[in-house]
Amino acid sequence: MNNDFHAYFKTGIVHFMAFPQIVSDSAKTEPTVRQIAVDDYFEVIEMTLIEEDEIRKKVKGILECASMEVVFGAQPVLLRQNLNINDENDTVREKSVSVLKQCVDQAYEIGATGLSFLSGKFNKERLEHAFELLVESTEEICKYAREKGNMMIELEVFDHEIDKKSLIGPVELAEKFGKRIREKYDNFGLLIDLSHLPLLKEKPSETIPRLKDFLTHIHIGNCLLSDRNSPVYGDYHPRFGYPGSENDVAELTEFLQVLVNTGFFNKKTRPIVSFEIKPAPGEHSEIIIANAKRTLNRAWLGVK
């Protein structure tokens, strides 16, 4: 492989995860976006909802000036409001879809090329019905986005039983879901995250080949399962190599190698591979970002 991975994919970062302080202090959104914009390691930034018009305009200007691609993450919006687009309660589901449409609107406003979201809760007894409701809601969002432009709508595959407990979910359901939505909408794709595979008890060599026809976006991160009392237990996304955690250089190398072997990386289209990492208590965003960059640099050296 070419030693420069930028030839094969665009490197991104999930802004709202790397800088979680913006959730409680929106005034920190602009300066933290600037920190990423001046770092040419990154071509892509993943933003979420910005309530204030003035901050949103400034952020859009920064990213246009920096020539960065933007994608929109609606996951925090759904999670914070406890929304569920496959809820059996029609009122809850309709509100959830409406909020996602508002996210699509803002994503287009800031120039985003894609929007990612997550499915609602897994309910074993009502699995098939919830699946059909998820299909219906997702098709509505894909249609809405396509009527406004060419934005990709991407469902992120989350854990099934431990943390977010999302319907999608295990590779069997993710594969089935990808096939169903792609029958009608080519502006749909799946997003998988290295950090979610241990939570799902799945391996890259098993999951990626089955989902390769629907994969459009990748997150790389870490999780911790070894200690339920840890402050970063579950789907927290600690830095790579965090004590007791699941992912470091070796695991990222394996993950990237499977993506190479299945033909995911493409020099013409260069898909997005974004860090999704969050500082643990007492840690600093700038340092864990440096950790992530070093980890990817080292991992790529092992890819053949």
Image (tube, rainbow, N blue to C red):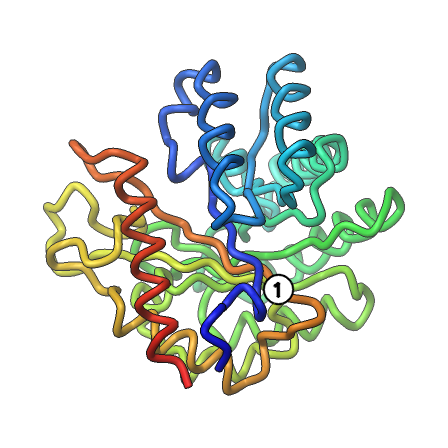
Q: Is residue 95 visible?
A: no
Q: Is residue 206 above or below residue 109?
A: below
Which residue appears at 64% of the width and 66% of the height?
Answer: 270
Disc 1 crowd rating (10 Å Cα; few below 14, some 14-19, many 20+) is some
293 or 131, which lies in front? 293
Which residue appears at 37% of the width and 61% of the height?
Answer: 196
9 or 206, which lies in front? 9
Q: Is residue 75 visible?
A: yes
162 on left or right of 28: left
Quadrant (top left/top right/bottom left/bottom right) for the C terminus:
bottom left
What is the x, y in percent for residue 2?
50, 77
Which residue appears at 31% of the width and 63% of the height?
Answer: 199
124 on left or right of 45: left
The kind of residue on which mark 1 rests is Pro
What is the x, y in percent for residue 195?
35, 60
Which residue appears at 49% of the width and 23% of the height?
Answer: 29
What is the x, y in percent for residue 282?
16, 32
Q: Is residue 52 above or below residue 95?
A: above
118 or 10, which lies in front? 10
What is the x, y in percent for residue 290?
31, 47
Q: How many marks?
A: 1
* Label 1 residue SS: loop
Which residue of the protein is positioned furthest toward the right in this rendering?
147
Name the residue carrying label 1: 271
Q: Is residue 238 above or below residue 104?
A: below
- Res 20 quadrant in image: top left
